[in-house]
Image: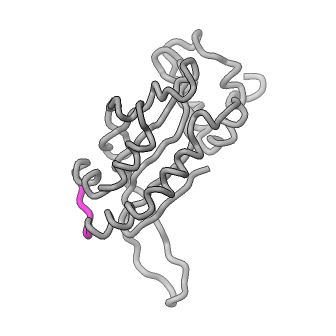
Amino acid sequence: MQHAFVFNEVAVLVRHWFEIDLADSHMEHGARVEIRLLAPQPRRGSESAAQVIVVDQPVWRADLFDRLDGSPGAFEAAHFHPHFVGVEPSERHWDEAVKAAPWDWLRTRLSDVAAIVASAGMQLRDPATENEQVRADAEVIVAAARSRAPMLCRSKQQCHDWTRDAEVAVHSMLGSLGRPDLLDRDRVSPWIPVGA
């Protein structure tokens, strides 16, 4: 399940995410917050008609993650991706402030969404208005992210339920592990088909 906060030019997506490191099979999970650009669509129908909303181009991502083999709430794997190349995220960027105070860090980032978009090499048509609108809803967005924090996901089944829509991505990770012998198969069992 994802929460989508859709503004005039950007959308902020919030969800829980589960990830398996491809090198050593350690696992991470927590809140993922992604900023995307809306693709303009032609108006259709009457003044009351439902309109098409396309949330497409990813711009920035924050992964406020714990390691499952670490200390709950330590945000040892918290990082961000300052831009995307097409649909692929840039390398992970680490910032001690993300680990020390992830929700404050996120709130601060959301206060200037135009700068985030510009640093990713794109421009908004009306950056001042977009900043104002996202800033006004920052508390609600941060609350949604906190509701998907790693400490609130207390079981493998709950993690699976919160990330059921990402099952194809998890299967891709499972098929690409450098050290499958290190995988905690019990923890990933909800994603593994019976008999596999």
Question: Which residue extends farthest bottom?
Answer: 46
Image position, residue 108 (x, y; %): 35, 49
Is 123 included in the stretch rendered in magenta?
yes
Q: Which residues are magenta?
A: 121-126
The residue positioned farthest toward the top in the image shown: 181
Q: Nearer the viewer, residue 141 or 56?
A: 141
Secondary structure mostly taken by the magenta-highlighted segment of the chain: loop
Q: Nearer the viewer, residue 157 or 146?
A: 146
Q: Is residue 169 visible?
A: no
On screen, residue 51 versus residue 152, left or right, reads left
Quarter of the picture holding the C terminus: top right
Residue 26 lies left or right of residue 36; in this view the side is right
**Is 114 on the left or on the right of 166, as rendered?**
left
Snapshot quadrant of residue 79: top left
59 lies above or below 19? below
Q: State the image quarter where residue 12 is shown.
A: bottom left
At a point 77% along the width and 23% down the height, the residue shown is 195
Residue in the picture at 41% in, 31% down: 100
Q: Residue furthest right?
A: 194
Asked if residue 135 is among those painted magenta in the image, a careful observer would answer no
